Image (tube, helix red, strand yellow):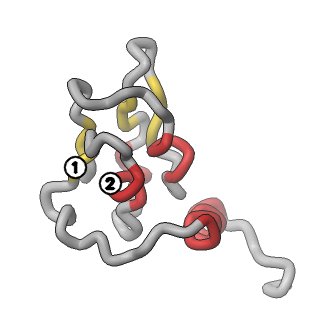
Amino acid sequence: MPKVDTRLCIGCSACEYMCPADVYRIGKAEKAYLAYPEDCVGLCWLCVQRCPVDAISWKDHTEKRMREFSPAFAWEQRRLAWGIQNKEDG
């Protein structure tokens, strides 16, 4: 499960935007937090990879940043998480 270090977080919303499972929110203190941690799929690590200040850590997966970020990959993960079909899928 990811963890947000609020001392480092700058409230940029990168995690909120990138998360395919939509688990992050920016709170009143303008810091990110896990609003829906139970929805985290734990497969992409985009939140860890895209945080510009390394405020998000994932104890068990920090070394597993295998996927290179791309907008196409982010959309594909979000599409899968939301159950949206491609036009080609029918």
Nearer to the camera, 42 or 6: 6
Quarter of image, res 43: bottom left
Asked whether, in this view, residue 41 is left or right of residue 16, the answer is left
Quarter of image, res 28: top left
Residue under the image location 37 percent in, 37 percent down: 34
Nearer to the camera, 7 or 77: 7
Residue 77 at x, y percent in the picture: 56, 68
Q: Is label 1 in a helix, a strand or a loop?
A: strand
- The kind of residue on which mark 2 rests is Val
Nearer to the camera, 40 or 30: 30
Direction front: furthest residue: 52
- Does residue 59 lie above or below 29 as drawn? below
Q: Which residue is labeled 1 in the image?
A: 57
Counting every numbered tag in the picture gives 2
Nearer to the camera, 80 or 26: 26
Residue under the image location 25 percent in, 30 percent down: 8
Q: Which residue is labeled 2 in the image?
A: 48
